[in-house]
Image (cartoon, helix red, strand yellow):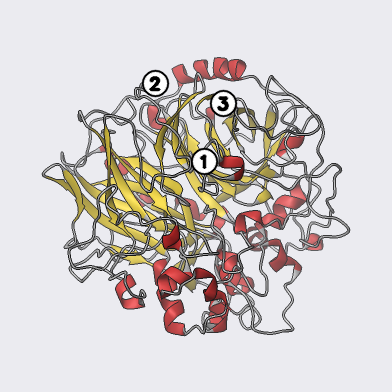
């Protein structure tokens, strides 16, 4: 999730709150009864002995690679590098990594994926050029190695393009002028083409990774690519439109943030802040309670698509927004594959989709809804996975049970089933059938009593223990007394959604965020019970900011946190490598000012999940976000995404950054291409001695 500012200079989607239920907040219970790290890990040690590494997707459970590479038995990996310094003012306009490592640019927005020309960044992007070039603002990604012994040197890199900055696409400066500029459908089509998913064949030649521009696998999936709608909501009346009266097909996938990947070799792309593209030209437009619960508004986030593309005018096409907010399954190895929106996994602002397979071959997908005071979900498939038969598993996400989490004060928790006819999910309460439960997932979660969380973002599973880790990026929606209504329908009632501040809730403005973790009972993804604790509360040990109340819990206050090692805040991206190192990426303002003056710009940290030790591995250019990380199967090449360098809607992006084309980490552009725009990019990181990254 980006920390972007939008054309009005004010609205940030991560600041949106649409949950007005009276459900408990996670910080209402953190300090009521903390499960200590020692006790949690003690119980985990017994789990390690009884769980095969193959039970977690991140290692040997990937059928798509099982026959192509030797089985890797993971060890608990030590952190073997020396931490680097934070990128504080005056900021370095490039990516920095530890001594003994090299980071270079692999691909940037506008680089051609075919033999057609690269984008000439001196001018505006057009739709035709964007359709054969890498999309804007990379986010979640995964590497699918090719069959055979060269899988560590050749494969498909699949990466989301979460959103775009219209002013950069359409070459409008300063950026703030986009809000009043005359726009055309051609301008919007270029923006829509900048969204979606990139599938790119990459290979290592003469020691350097590069794009194979002649590969038939290379393709773009955009905001106008035909997609299927499947699962319980397919064909429902709320999914039907004038252009799709059957409610089974939709054009495009939008705001693809983080991701997941499956044992049967497919990629899961998650639609997050899709609501921001919708608006209405009608002065009479007023969002319904259902639309308000998902953040639909008259002007959206300032993209202005509804002004020239009537599909995004909610007044004209009331059901079109219902066709976004899903997890999209894509087969990267089939260039003719049609992306499928899996409605059984629920509709909300999906941040990521972590797939776990347990010892009985049951499949679960863990997901977060990235907005303040929203929820954590788990989907369990109705059928078991069939190992060694990838094709038979392709529709495992078609049918199953969706659950939402309640975190209890004693360190236990319960997965609450979201099944029509149960727990108040009835016609009397606005749910006519199971399809409506899924289309109105947020309202259903309100009704069953889930726990409100501080922006649930990326989810990662430990490669040995099956413990699930979740980043909770931040939340500044807290007050001295509760001011929440209990209408369950999205209306605000007499109050607003601000959980109370008290000794059990030490962060009224949770600027720096935290990471929570849990383990399902008996190691079974079908279990409806789990135990949880807080892995870390992030913060800045050097800050002078105080709570005012002077409250201190467990030796740390609400701002300094309890980090063991280098400070960081606003955790977002999360990923375990094959040896059990936890990689943490951050998403804050990125300008090394205000609350971040000591922490500096955004970073990628490496943490030991046993000791909690954390070291700073990577720093990013100004005003950028670090998002997306994966390695080759041998762990010797790492791919990391750098999103929206220089972003600032008040001025011009180039005032803050010229990366990557300033040459700090190399450049992928060819001679003769004019370069002057900062561009989101994916970088390649290798250890100079050829070893495993992080070791």
Which quarter shows the C terminus? top left
Q: Residue furthest left?
A: 206
Residue 627: % across, % down: 44, 47
Residue 16: % across, % down: 67, 57
First in residue order: circle 3 vs circle 2: 2
Location of mark 1 (residue): 459
Location of mark 3 (residue): 563
Question: Viewer-nearest of labels 3 and 2?
Answer: 3
Helix, strand or loop at disc 1?
Answer: strand
The residue lying at 40 percent from left, 30 percent from top is 84
First in residue order: circle 1 vs circle 3: 1
The residue lying at 57 percent from left, 69 percent from top is 7
Helix, strand or loop at disc 2?
Answer: loop
Left of 186 or right of it: where is 539? right
Q: Which label number is shown at residue 76?
A: 2
Residue 118, picture quadrant:
bottom left
Q: Which label number is shown at residue 508?
A: none
In whole angstroms, how far apart are the C-alphas of marks 2 and 1? 19 Å
The residue lying toward the viewer, choosing from 515 and 681, is 681
């Amino acid at each position: 999730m980006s920390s972007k500012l939008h054309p009005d200079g004010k609205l940030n989607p991560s600041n949106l709150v649409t949950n007005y239920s009276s459900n408990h907040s996670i910080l209402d219970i953190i300090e009521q009864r903390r499960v200590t790290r020692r006790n949690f890990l003690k119980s985990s040690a017994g789990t390690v002995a009884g769980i095969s590494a193959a039970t977690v997707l991140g290692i040997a459970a990937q059928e798509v690679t099982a026959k192509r590479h030797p089985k890797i038995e993971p060890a608990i990996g030590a952190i073997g590098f020396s931490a680097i310094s934070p990128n504080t003012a005056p900021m370095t306009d490039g990516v920095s990594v530890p001594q003994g490592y090299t980071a270079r640019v692999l691909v940037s927005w506008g680089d051609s994926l075919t033999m057609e020309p690269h984008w000439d960044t001196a001018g505006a992007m057009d739709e035709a050029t964007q359709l054969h070039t890498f999309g804007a603002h990379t986010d979640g990604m995964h590497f699918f190695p090719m069959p055979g012994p060269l899988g560590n040197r050749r494969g498909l890199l699949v990466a989301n393009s979460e959103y775009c900055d219209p002013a950069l696409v359409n070459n409008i400066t300063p950026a703030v002028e986009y809000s009043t500029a005359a726009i055309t459908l051609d301008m919007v089509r270029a923006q829509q083409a900048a969204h979606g998913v990139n599938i790119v064949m990459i290979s290592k030649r003469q020691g350097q990774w590069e794009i194979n521009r002649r590969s038939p696998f290379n393709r773009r999936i955009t905001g106008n690519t035909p997609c299927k709608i499947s699962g319980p909501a397919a064909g429902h009346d709320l999914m039907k439109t004038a252009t799709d009266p059957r409610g089974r097909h939709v054009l495009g996938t939008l705001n693809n943030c983080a991701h997941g990947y499956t044992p049967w070799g497919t990629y899961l792309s998650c639609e997050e802040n899709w609501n921001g593209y919708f608006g209405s030209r009608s002065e009479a437009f007023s969002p319904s309670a259902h639309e308000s619960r998902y953040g639909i508004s008259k002007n959206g986030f300032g993209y202005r698509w509804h002004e020239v593309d009537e599909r995004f005018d909610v007044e004209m096409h009331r059901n079109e927004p219902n066709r976004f907010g899903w997890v999209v399954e894509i087969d990267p190895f089939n260039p003719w594959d049609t992306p499928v929106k899996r409605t059984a996994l629920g509709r909300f602002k999906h941040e990521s989709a972590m797939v776990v397979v347990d010892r009985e071959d049951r499949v679960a997908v863990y997901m977060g809804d990235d907005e303040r005071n929203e929820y954590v979900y788990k989907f369990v498939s109705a059928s078991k996975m069939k190992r060694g038969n990838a094709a038979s598993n392709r529709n495992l996400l078609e049918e199953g049970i969706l659950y939402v989490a309640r975190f209890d004060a004693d360190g236990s928790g319960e997965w609450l089933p979201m099944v029509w006819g149960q727990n108040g999910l009835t016609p009397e309460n606005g749910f006519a059938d199971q399809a409506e439960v899924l289309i109105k997932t947020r309202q259903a979660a309100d009704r069953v009593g889930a726990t409100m969380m501080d922006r649930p973002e990326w989810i990662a599973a430990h490669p040995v223990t099956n413990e699930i880790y979740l980043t909770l990026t931040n939340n500044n929606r807290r007050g001295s007394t509760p001011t929440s209504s209990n209408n369950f329908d999205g209306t605000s009632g007499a109050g607003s959604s601000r959980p109370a501040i008290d000794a059990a809730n030490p962060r009224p403005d949770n600027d720096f965020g935290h990471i929570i973790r849990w383990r399902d009972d008996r190691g079974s993804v079908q279990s409806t019970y789990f135990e949880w604790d807080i892995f870390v509360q992030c913060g800045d040990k050097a800050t002078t900011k105080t709570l005012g109340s002077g409250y201190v819990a467990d030796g740390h206050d609400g701002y300094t946190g309890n980090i063991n090692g280098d400070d960081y805040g606003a955790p977002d991206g999360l990923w375990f490598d094959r040896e059990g190192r936890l990689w943490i990426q951050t998403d804050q303002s990125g300008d090394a000012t205000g609350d971040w003056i000591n922490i500096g710009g955004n970073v990628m940290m490496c943490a030991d999940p046993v000791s909690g030790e954390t070291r700073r591995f990577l720093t990013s250019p100004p005003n950028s976000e670090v998002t997306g990380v994966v390695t080759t199967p041998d762990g010797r090449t790492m791919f990391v995404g750098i999103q929206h360098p220089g972003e600032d809607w008040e001025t011009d992006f180039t005032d803050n950054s010229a990366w990557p084309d300033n040459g700090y980490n190399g450049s992928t552009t060819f001679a003769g291409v004019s370069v002057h725009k900062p561009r989101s990019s994916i970088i390649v990181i290798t250890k100079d001695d050829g070893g495993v990254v992080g070791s």
